[in-house]
Image (cartoon, rainbow, N blue to C red):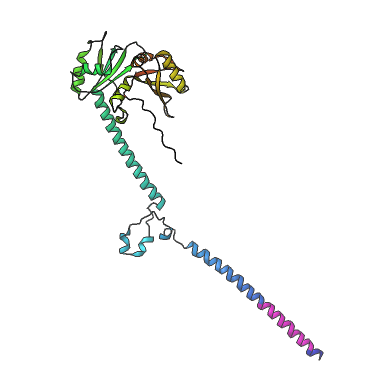
Amino acid sequence: MAAVADKSGEAAAAAAAANNNNNLVVEKAKSESKEFNVQKLVDMFTKLNPLAKEFFPSSYHHNQTNNNNNNNNFNQVPINKQSVGNENFSNRRRRNNYNQGRRRLNGRAFRAQREDSIRRTVYVSDIDQTITEERLAGLFSNCGQVVDCRVCGDPHSVLRFAFVEFADEEGARAALNLGGTMLGFYPVKVLPSKTAILPVNPTFLPRSEDEREMCTRTVYCTNIDKKVSQAEVKNFFESACGEVTRLRLLGDHVHSTRIAFVEFAMAESAIIALNCSGMVLGTQPIRVSPSKTPVRPRVTRPTLH
C-alpha cells in the first residue's frame, strides 16, 4: 500500500509538474505573441512609404496625368526631385521673385516719370514775399501750360523760391528766358530744376470757394522737432504772426521730424508766417510754405450705444 501510495504521490507530483510546465508554456506563448505583435508593428512602420499620398499635405496637388497610365505612379517620386515642402517653398520663392520683378518695373517706371517731370520743371528764386502762387503762375503762363506751382520759404533768405512745372519740356525751356524779370520789387532767377514737385493728393485739395479762402490763411510747416508739442507750435506762430484758428500736427515712426498745417484768422498772418522759415523751434530750423490744402475739421464718429 505504501508503494502504491508513493507511486500515486509521484504521479501527483508529476501531474503538478506537468501543469506547471503547461502554465509556463502558455505564459511563454503569450509573451512571444506580444513580442511578435510589437515586432510586426515595427516592421510595418519601417515599410511605410513616406511619399505615399496619405502623407502629402492637402495643399499639394499632384499632377494626375500619370495616373491614367498607372495608378501606382502616384507614390513614385523621382529621387532628384525636391520634397513636397521644398517644392512649395520654391513655388513661393518664384512668386516672390515675380513680385519683386514687378516692383522693380514699377520702380523704373516711377523713376522715368519723375525724370520726365524734372525736365518739365524750373526752379525760381529771389521771389518777393508779396508774390502769391497765382501771380507767379500767371507770369509763366505765357511760356506754356502750367501744371503746378509751388512757392516755398527760404530759411537762408528773406526772399522765397518756387518750382513751376509745365505740361511739356518746351514750356520749361521757354521759362528759362524769363530770368531777370522784375516780379514785385526783385528780379527773379530761373534755372532748370533738379527735383520734381511732389504731387498733392487730389482729395486734400480745396473743394469749394470757402476752402480756397481757407488756404490763403494756411501755411505748411515742415522739419518740426518731434519733442515739440502742438501747444508749443501754436504758441510759436501766435506770438510771431497772429491768432491761430486751427492747427494739425502730423508725424509717424519713419521720419525724424513732423509737419503741421497752421490756419490763421487773417491772411496777413499767413504771409508773415512765411518769414518764419529758418527760425528754430525746439532744436530744428522750421520751413514754412503756403499750403495747398485746407485744414478740414475732424469728423467725429457717432458713438455706438
Q: Is residue 108 visible?
A: yes
Q: Nearer the viewer, residue 253 or 97?
A: 253
Magenta segment:
5-22
Residue at x 67% of width, y 77% of height: 21
Q: Is residue 36 magenta?
A: no
Query: On screen, 228 above or below 66?
Result: above
Query: On screen, 131 above or below 203?
Result: above
- Quadrant in the picture for residue 8: bottom right
Q: Nearer the viewer, residue 173 or 221?
A: 221
Q: Could you say where residue 245 lies in the image, as x and y percent from the top left?
A: 39, 21
- Horizontally, residue 209 falls left or right of residue 171, namely right
- Horizontally, residue 299 falls left or right of residue 42, namely left
Residue at x 32% of width, y 62% of height: 67
- Farthest front residue in view: 305
Query: On screen, 17 above or below 134?
Result: below
Q: Could you say where residue 291 lies in the image, as x and y percent from the top left?
A: 33, 22
- Farthest top residue in view: 185
Q: Main secondary structure of the magenta part?
A: helix
- Quadrant in the picture for residue 273: top left
